[in-house]
Amino acid sequence: QVQLVESGGGLVQAGGSLNLSCAASGSRFSISAVAWYRQAPGKQRELVATSPTGGTTNYADFVKGRFTISRDNTKNTVYLQMNSLEPEDTAVYYCYALVTFGASRNVFQYWGQGTQVTVSS
């Protein structure tokens, strides 16, 4: 089992910044990929950014140039730096990870509990 715990959400004015963190904990696991999703009220959950291990980061068009996903593999932590925030960015942000355990090739997916980001106009 792996636990993902997000932090860093809050209330910010339009044009402001927030830095979300997601810390993964567990035993004998390796992260294959991490991502951030978000879900606004009444809308479907949508992909914000991805970071595959050893791969290239990717961003949804609506956050390109404003958000940056990064990882500290020594801490099993992924970050989402969000700049130039807009009211449309208001949502619950979720951390997502694809994980393997030991020598197994089976891949498991985990979600964090979510952190609320509210951007006021």
Image (spheres, rainbow, N blue to C red):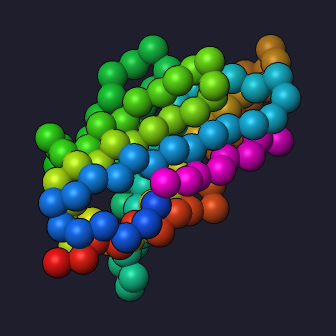
Quick check: is 20 in the magenta stretch? no
Magenta region, main secondary structure: strand
Rendered residue at 63%/62% (across/down): 113
**Residue 102 appears left or right of 111:** right
Q: Is residue 114 left or right of residue 13?
A: right
Residue that appears at 46% across and 61% down: 9
Task: Report the residue that reaches farthest toward the bottom.
Answer: 42
Look at the image and tell me in which quarter the C terminus lies. Answer: bottom left
Which residue corresponds to the image point at 69% horizontal and 23% vertical from the top-left? Answer: 30
Image-based side of 105 in relation to 77, left or right = right
Return the x and y of residue 87 as percentages of the image width and height.
21, 73
Residue at image point 30% right, 37% down? 68
Q: From the viewer's perspective, is residue 89 above or below residue 52?
A: below
Specify the segment rendered in magenta. Answer: 1-8
**Residue 104 point in image, percent of width and height:** 79, 21
Tell which of 83 and 108 is nearer to you: 83
